[in-house]
Amino acid sequence: MFKFFRRVRQALLSESKFSKYLLYALGEIVLVMIGILLALQVNNWNEQRKLSRELDSFASAMIHDLENDITALDIGIRQTKAAYLLLDSLITYSRNLQNINEAINIDVYLLSSRNSYRAIAWSRSTFEELKNSGALRYVENDSLLSLLNRYEALTYHLDKDLTYDDESAKIFGSSIRKVIDFNYPQSANLLPNWYNMPVDGIPDFNTLEHYQKYRSNDLELLTDNLNELKIAVNHAIPLSFGIRIRAENEFPNAKQMATKIIQLLRKEYELK
């Protein structure tokens, strides 16, 4: 092909047909440019297909991560709900005491036995890879992109909340241990599964294994001063307040956002 075009150019020059040669040369340049543009277009198509496959892969992985988050959030909601219901009941129990003799060690023990929750193990690897690879800028759905960023910000906010709640739990635990006796034999058998509590409140202690036996031979409080008990219980108030927010607002909001992101990802990238 190239030899043919070269012979044509030489023939035109040898015949002194410069104008025709010039037109031919321009035409050849145009053909070369068209060839280059076609090659670039093909390359662009290939890159677009590659990017599309990468985004589909990221979307599938992101859905998997978010489903793991939702499972962890469901556990977190149960744990935080159990904690704040017990703490609220302890606060009410303390408020209603008229003298220290009304306080029963085993009841205070049970009501103070759940005052924390497990950290959420967020699945952030796919979103971090999206950001680090630069692929995030190719997400064209503004609503999806905004929700992804808001969700990530909320997860880091909840990590900070956990740090605050853990500090509050340490303060409360340190205070309550000074006024009640925890030294029950086989205490693991006494404590119920708080995470399966009824929606409307804590279970009746009389239904708990060993409760009546321990109640009839109960340990004594470590204080005979009602104010000392109330001061210790006061530390449960900010702890209960914070954990209630996680249980009723922040964790459910995070779950709702994760669910919405999954829906948008499935629709945007046509995934099942």
Image: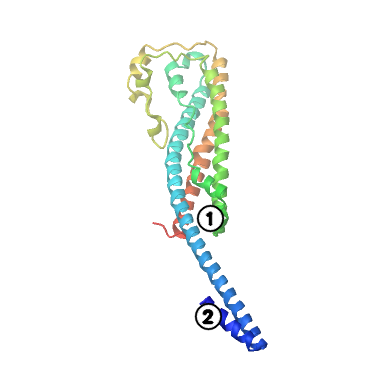
The quadrant of the image that shows the C terminus is: bottom left
Does residue 241 sit above or below 138 in this rendering? above
Read off the residue under disc 2.
4
User: Looking at the picture, how far across and down is residue 208, in whole percent?
Assistant: 34, 24
Read off the residue under disc 1.
144
Kind of element beneath mark 2:
helix
| Neighbourhood count class around disc 1 (C-alpha, 10 Å): few under 14, some 14–19, many 20 upward | some
User: Looking at the picture, how far across and down is residue 255, in whole percent?
Assistant: 47, 45
Which is nearer the eye, 105 or 262? 262
Q: Is residue 255 left or right of residue 13?
A: left
| Residue at 37%, 34% in the rendered image | 196
| Residue at 45%, 23% in the rendered image | 113
Does residue 159 sit above or below 54 in this rendering? above
Which is nearer the eye, 222 or 42? 42
Q: Estimate the spatial distance between the alpha carbons at disc 1 and disc 2, rounded to whole Å.
A: 56 Å
Kind of element beneath mark 1:
helix
